[in-house]
Image (spheres, helix red, strand yellow):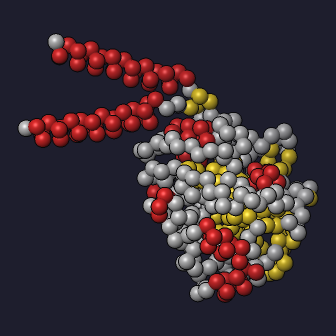
Amino acid sequence: MRILKIISKIIIGIVSLIVTLLVLQYVITPKYRFSEPKPFSGDYLYNPYAGVDSTKWVKANFHVHTRSYAGVTNGSNNSNAFLDSIYRYFGYGIIGISDYQKINRYESDHKWFIPVYEHGFSYYKTHHLTLNAQKVLWLDLPFYETVHNKQFMINLIRKDPGVVLTIPHPNLRQAYTFDDFKHLSNYNCLEICNNDRQFTFFYDTILSAGHPVFLMADDDAHNLMKIRDGIHCFNLINTELVKDSILHAIKTGRLVGVNFNVRPFTNNEEKKLALDALPEISDISLKGDTLSVALSDTVRSIKFIGQNGNVMKSADNSSNASYLFRKEDTYIRTEVLCRDSTIYYFNPVLRYDGKKLGYDPPEFDALRTWLLRSVVIIILILCLIIIRKLRK
């Protein structure tokens, strides 16, 4: 009987904990009023590549894992020194190590060093790639998150004004939905591709809803011993190799994401030769209402993509192409398909009013939030009264 009592107490304790967490996540956390999605509009065009210097494109990766927590997390095959040597061999100028819930300072002696970590440890992978954080945020929500939960976590991370926040692998375990991206705001970037995954469908949803979010491309590598795990997706950033310059370039969109086709290679030597042979970006400019893109070599296609992900124009077997903005175009982003099936993703040129690129952030819904909290408080008081009476 004593064992049964102990077991029952443990079960009651576990159930009580789960109920408490459910209440905290779904009832106590803030609720928001989200504005209806509104496409970009205005008489002005924002070009993120205005004034780029074609000699200052730097390879960068911000999402890769090393051995941490005694090898418990996925990434135990990557030591800091091994990771550094691999990325340097392939000519990367910026190496960001994004361990889970840990700021890795192995590269901190460099002027370009940006502290980065991957926030989140719930099963549903609603994670945040957090750049330039001063410290790790340990709070996370354990159960599947509502759009209110997701906005709450984004706002919490962004309380640090220096943080540049990217949402990584958005469809992994269905962490985010299309409806989420129509409403969420206050983050800087979305991973447009990550290892073998690409997320253009989510990105066009974000842009079509009028959110000024830029793209990022990352390896999310966990085992660099595998030929296809690293040097796969990366960023070309137009920047000086100094932290503030890099962060400014990311926040303003002066970046191109690259999904390098690594399938044909069996060793790093072959891979490096192919990487070095990729076409260089010789021009990305906006003159009047005409967007022009040029590369150093002929590519299979250059596509100009607009509202709802529609291809507005495509140029095949060319090294350059241009697109004339129409009045009804809300944004135009460019995709380049190289002859080896590597893809370049350019940040969008956006319509705006000439003052701000913006989307009204969701407002804290005080009435709904405190109404739900009050209900919980009343229920708890009633439960205490009932328990007290039963004991008497």
Q: Horizontal and vertical percent for residue 164?
A: 69, 48
Using the image, determine if residue 114 lies above or below residue 379.
Answer: below
Could you tell me which residue is drawn at 49 percent across and 32 percent down? 29
Q: Horizontal and vertical percent for residue 36?
A: 62, 37
User: As rendered, which of 55 and 182 lies closer to the eye?
Assistant: 55
**Which residue is outermost to the left?**
1
Using the image, determine if residue 7 lies above or below residue 117.
Answer: above
User: As rendered, which of 99 and 219 lies closer to the eye?
Assistant: 99
Is residue 333 rendered to the left or right of residue 1? right
Could you tell me which residue is drawn at 87 percent across and 71 percent down? 282
Using the image, determine if residue 284 lies above or below residue 392.
Answer: below
The answer to whether residue 6 shows anywhere in this view is yes
User: As rendered, which of 357 and 388 lies closer to the eye?
Assistant: 388
The answer to whether residue 166 shows anywhere in this view is no
Q: Horizontal and vertical percent for residue 188?
A: 69, 48
Which image quarter is the C terminus in? top left
Q: Quadrant of residue 217?
A: bottom right
Could you tell me which residue is drawn at 85 percent across and 60 percent down? 240
Using the image, determine if residue 343 lies above or below residue 329.
Answer: below
Could you tell me which residue is drawn at 49 percent across and 53 percent down? 125
